[in-house]
Amino acid sequence: MTARPVHFDGPGGDGPRRAPPMPARTPQGLRLALQEHAPHLPADFQAHWRRAVADAFGLAPVPAFTRLWWTQYALALARGLGLEAHLLDLETRAAQSEGPQESTALLAEYSRLRRQAAAVEPGR
């Protein structure tokens, strides 16, 4: 059995609740999951879909689009675990760092966490 992240409803909420499983790795699966579990993202998803895919002359952009939004959805689910705040902190510290080695290390950690979020499989 795999560990599942636990989210809280916030102050006065009903207590812990399990994070929803990842949807099918398709644009339609992501669209439905965003509407249900990350209601702040569907407008951005739709605008990006129109710009990157609907106005294209083929389906070549769909895999990259799906991967980007898959990662965004995974990060939105992990928000309750503080991952989004941690990523923002890494990005800010890298921008403000004095030395290139520190900045490179911070951005490498940022990239590793985003790749890890992108690698989550459907149903997990």
Image (cartoon, rainbow, N blue to C red):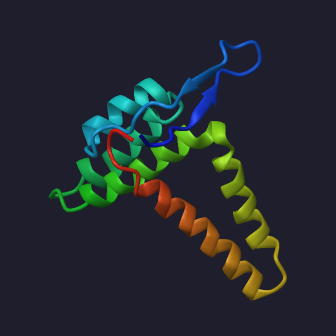
42 relative position to 24: left or right:
right
Position in image of residue 17 (x %, y %): 57, 23
Position in image of residue 44 (x %, y %): 46, 40
Quadrant of residue 123 in the image? top left
Quadrant of residue 103 in the image? bottom right
Q: Which residue: 41% across, 41% down? A: 45
Q: Residue furthest left?
A: 58
Q: Is residue 63 above or below residue 43?
A: below
Q: Which residue: 59% across, 32% down? A: 6
- Front one among 57 and 44: 44
Position in image of residue 83 (x %, y %): 64, 49
Q: Residue furthest bottom?
A: 100
- Front one among 9 and 88: 9
Q: Which residue: 28% across, 36% down? A: 29
109 relative position to 97: left or right:
left
Q: Residue furthest front?
A: 1
- Front one among 27 and 8: 8
Q: Which residue: 47% across, 28% down? A: 37
Q: Is residue 94 above or below residue 22?
A: below
Quadrant of residue 1 in the image? top left
113 relative position to 59: left or right:
right
82 relative position to 23: left or right:
right
Position in image of residue 81 (x %, y %): 65, 41
Q: Quadrant of the C terminus?
A: top left
